[in-house]
């Protein structure tokens, strides 16, 4: 127990740190301690990775907290002078009574009330002793997308490209720019094509932002440029860009509102 490693100290975060704080601390320290970086150290980097893996898993984090508590209790017991324990407890009781502090029963009732209030908080899920915030679909400012990589970038671009191709083809058929064949009924959609293009841009940007953050939205704009450029349906690029701008506006206003709380 005396050699118990405190992974919170390794990452430099408090024990009540959220998953976002743990992830950000790991990314920052990983850049400094990576063996390929100046001043990096392979042993410290390995320890940093181990700390991140443990604290990112709720069950392993719970066990780590229990081990820390046991190590702390063992350390306290080894230094405890039992001959003075009774006098110390009596002195603390007398001090509490003199200061008029709450008794044990009242403190327990207050803690239970706080626990009940906390469990009812909006979009907060309790897992063991930890609270995990779950962003609702209409709260994109609470999403925590991972940094863009080849996979998420390719999915963002390919998915939005396919969506714009489909919306653009419907637009060509609806406006008569292409022969709709048996789908002549699509002509009824011609007045609504700006709305369809806007919704396509909004949804493509929404899912790309969830996957790859702002870089994903930028890739959606590139896909709109490719599809809506020369020869593309009239209005596709403009109205798809309006949909992307609406998403960015929602994220901005959500961040402003969260900052004021």
Image (tube, helix red, strand yellow):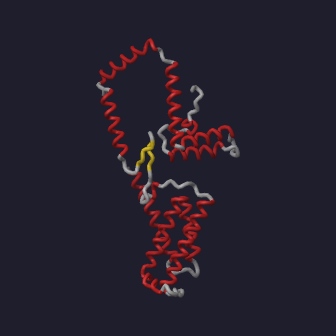
Compared to residue 56, the image places residue 176 above or below, namely below
Looking at the image, residue 59 sits to the left or right of residue 88; the answer is right
Compared to residue 199, the image places residue 181 above or below, namely below
Q: How many marks?
A: 0
Which of the 4 image quadrants contains residue 2? Answer: top right
Nearest the eye: 119 or 200:
119
Looking at the image, residue 202 sits to the left or right of residue 113; the answer is right
Nearest the eye: 235 or 186:
186
Query: Which residue appears at 31% of the width and 33% of the height?
Result: 109
Which of the 4 image quadrants contains residue 152? Answer: bottom right
The x and y percentages for residue 159 are 56, 67
Query: Which residue appears at 47% of the width and 14% of the height?
Result: 81
The x and y percentages for residue 38 are 69, 43
The residue lying furthest to the top in this view is 83
The residue lying furthest to the front in this view is 182
Query: Which residue appears at 44% of the width and 52% of the height?
Result: 134
Query: Which residue appears at 49% of the width and 71% of the height?
Result: 200
Compared to residue 33, the image places residue 199 above or below, namely below
Compared to residue 220, the image places residue 61 above or below, namely above
The x and y percentages for residue 179 are 53, 87
Looking at the image, residue 43 sits to the left or right of residue 243; the answer is right
Nearest the eye: 257 or 205:
205
Quadrant showing the N terminus: top right
């Amino acid at each position: 127990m005396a050699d118990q490693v405190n992974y919170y100290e390794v990452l430099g975060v408090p024990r009540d740190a959220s998953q976002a704080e743990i992830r950000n601390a790991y990314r920052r320290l990983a850049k400094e301690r990576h063996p390929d970086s100046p001043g990096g150290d392979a042993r410290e980097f390995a320890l940093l990775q181990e700390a991140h893996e443990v604290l990112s898993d709720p069950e392993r984090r719970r066990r780590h907290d229990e081990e820390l508590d046991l190590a702390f209790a063992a350390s306290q017991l080894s230094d405890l002078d039992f001959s003075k324990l009774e006098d110390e407890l009596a002195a603390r009781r007398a001090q509490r009574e003199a200061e008029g502090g709450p008794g044990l029963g009242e403190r327990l009732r207050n803690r239970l009330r706080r626990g009940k209030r906390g469990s009812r908080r909006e979009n907060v899920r309790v897992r063991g002793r930890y609270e995990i915030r779950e962003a609702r679909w209409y709260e994109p400012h609470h999403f925590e997308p991972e940094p863009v990589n080849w996979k998420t970038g390719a999915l963002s671009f390919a998915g939005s490209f396919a969506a714009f191709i489909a919306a653009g083809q419907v637009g060509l058929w609806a406006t008569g720019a292409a022969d709709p064949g048996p789908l002549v009924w699509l002509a009824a959609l011609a007045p609504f094509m700006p709305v369809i293009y806007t919704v396509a841009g909004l949804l493509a940007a929404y899912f790309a932002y969830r996957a790859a953050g702002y870089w994903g939205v930028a890739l959606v704009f590139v896909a709109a440029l490719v599809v809506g450029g020369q020869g593309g349906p009239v209005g596709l690029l403009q109205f798809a860009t309006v949909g992307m701008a609406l998403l960015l506006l929602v994220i901005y206003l959500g961040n402003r509102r969260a900052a004021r709380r």
